[in-house]
Image (cartoon, rainbow, N blue to C red):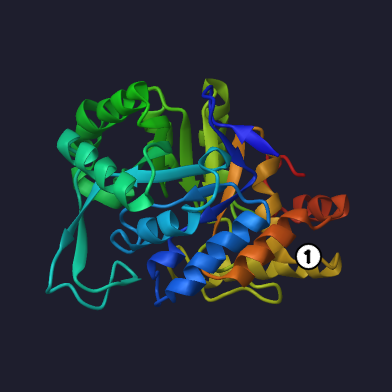
Amino acid sequence: MTRPVGATATSVSALGFGAAPIGNLYEEVDEDQALSAIRAAYDAGVRYFDTAPYYGYGLSESRLGRGLRDLPRSSLTISTKVGRRVHDDAAAVGRRDGFAVDGRRAEFDYSRDSVLRSIESSLRRLDTDYIDILLLHDIGRLTHGERHEAVLRQALEEALPAMDELKASGVCRAIGIGVNEQDIALELMPLFPLDCVMLAGRYTLLEQHDSLAALREAQRRGISILVAGPYSSGLMSDASAPGKTYNYAPVDARTLKRAERIYAICAVHGVDVGAAALQFPLAHPAVATVVAGMRSPAEARSAAQRMRAPLPSALWQDLHTAGLLEAEAPTP
């Protein structure tokens, strides 16, 4: 079953394939493993695949293009992003930005020229003649600090109008932003007509309070929310116990305690926390899909199984009673 993206003709599967890991996020991924992960996800029913030039400095897009090449294009929904330029740089070695890729680097660029050059490169790497969803990547005050106002102005004057023109010409079918900050979503939605917002790591089983206002505004405007990072940067991905990272950094004691309480309640009901983490966001009417990072066939199959796992209503009741879910947050 698919869900529409805003008022467009584009739709997404309830579970999406997050392709950052196959861009060698944190560690190298074998080419055959990456391609097998893509195919395993498709075979398990996933039809939405999300990537970005930033993920492995083009490696994720190239692998996704190869992995999807022999599948019917009309059966796929592909999203990628603009807002960074990728450059060859022989001096760039090691895990820059978390990606185990040498010889390339990325820098922010929200100019019109950058958008047009970026989409041209993405189409080539993805081996397709159109993108279903094009997202403006990583704008926001927490990301850009004192440059936020200038970045937002350039996004409104150059990047987003260029993306709108690409949509009008059929190069992409829907446009939006891909961010980790709910505040920029609230700030931007009244300023430019968007079809969707990809919000990573904010509306999750672990936390909802700060993102509910953004979801309410999106629902009011008919903008679809694409939830990414449902496992909270690895904290909620393991079936047995919380992980050690949150927000791409070592988890703090307070957040870890909250995660442990969620794990304890899930254990009482015999529930895999990962299944609850994937299914919970989809209960909100503004949410169209949940995008989970996958780097292997096993992870792809596990995510698909978690999406289908039956979860008792008593689980959600107990999480609400314990104050671990916001009263306003709907549950499956």
Residue that mark 1 sits on: 266
Q: Position of residue 180 (x, y in %)?
A: 42, 49
Residue drawn at x 39%, y 65% is 23
Q: Which residue is nearer to you in this view: 180 or 137?
A: 137
The relative height of residue 97 versus residue 183 in the rendered view (above or below) is: below
Disc 1 is placed on an element classified as: helix
Horizontally, residue 228 falls left or right of residue 22, namely right
Residue sitting at x 75%, y 44%: 331
Above or below for 70 versus 261: above
**Is residue 278 depicted above or below 217 in this figure?**
below
Q: Looking at the rendering, which quadrant does residue 148 occupy? A: top left
316 vs 138, nearest the viewer: 138
Name which residue type carries label 1. Cys
Question: In the picture shown, does residue 36 fall above or below 16?
Answer: below
From where the camera sits, is residue 145 visible? yes
Q: Residues within 10 Å of mark 1 (few under 14, many from 20)?
A: many
Residue 243 in the image, given as x and y percentages of width and height? 57, 74
Direction front: furthest residue: 70
Q: Quadrant of the N terminus?
A: top right
Q: State which quadrant residue 171 falls in.
A: top left
**If the image is split into quadrants, where does the C terminus sit?**
top right
Q: In the rendering, at what x and y percent does residue 241 appear?
A: 67, 76
Percent x, y of residue 326: 67, 45
Query: How many callouts does the rendering have?
Result: 1
209 or 107, nearer to the observer? 107
Residue 257 shows in this picture: no
Question: In front: 168, or 285?
Answer: 168
Q: Is residue 142 left or right of residue 218?
A: left
Residue at point 26%, 47% (across, down): 121
